[in-house]
Amino acid sequence: MPTYKLVMVFKNSDDKSTTLTISDADPAVTQAAAVAAMDAIVAADIFQPSGLTLVSKTDCKLIATTESDFYDKPAI
C-alpha cells in the first residue's frame, strides 16, 4: 500500500525556494485544497524558515511511494 506526502514549494523574501512537506498526507486531497492551503500559509505568515517570509507559491505535488521488502532477516 502506498504512502503519500504533500510537497509544497514556496518562494521566500530572499527570492529562494523553501519546501514544506506533509508526511502521511490524505491521498484524496484535491489540487484545489492543496492550493488553498498554500494560500492560507502565505497569508497567515506563520512559517518563517531562516527568519524569511514566504511570499508566493512555486509548486505543489502529491507523491505516492510504495515499498517492497525483498529481504527477510534470518532468525537466530
Image (tube, grey):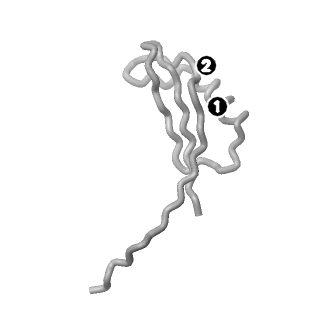
Q: Position of residue 57 (x, y in %)?
A: 58, 23
Q: Residue 37: which numbered mark, if any?
A: 1
Residue annotated with mark 2: 43
Q: Residues within 10 Å of mark 2 (few under 14, many from 20)?
A: few
Quarter containing the C terminus:
bottom left
In-front residue for pair 68/9: 68
Q: Residues within 10 Å of mark 1 (few under 14, many from 20)?
A: few
Q: Amino acid at mark 1?
A: Ala
Q: Position of residue 43 (x, y in %)?
A: 61, 19
Drawn side of residue 29 relative to residue 76, left or right: right
Q: Position of residue 28 (x, y in %)?
A: 70, 49
For the point 65% across and 50% down, the residue is: 27
Secondary structure under tag 1 reads: helix
In-front residue for pair 60/29: 60
Quarter containing the N terminus:
bottom right
- Looking at the image, tell me whether mark 2 or mark 1 is earlier in sequence order: 1
For the point 31% across and 83% down, the residue is: 74
Q: Looking at the image, is 70 positioned above or below residue 43?
A: below
Q: Amino acid at mark 2?
A: Ala
Q: Looking at the image, is 12 positioned above or below residue 64?
A: above
Instruction: State if disc 1 and disc 2 touch (CB < 8 Å).
Output: no
Drawn side of residue 8 relative to residue 76, left or right: right
**Total marks drawn?**
2
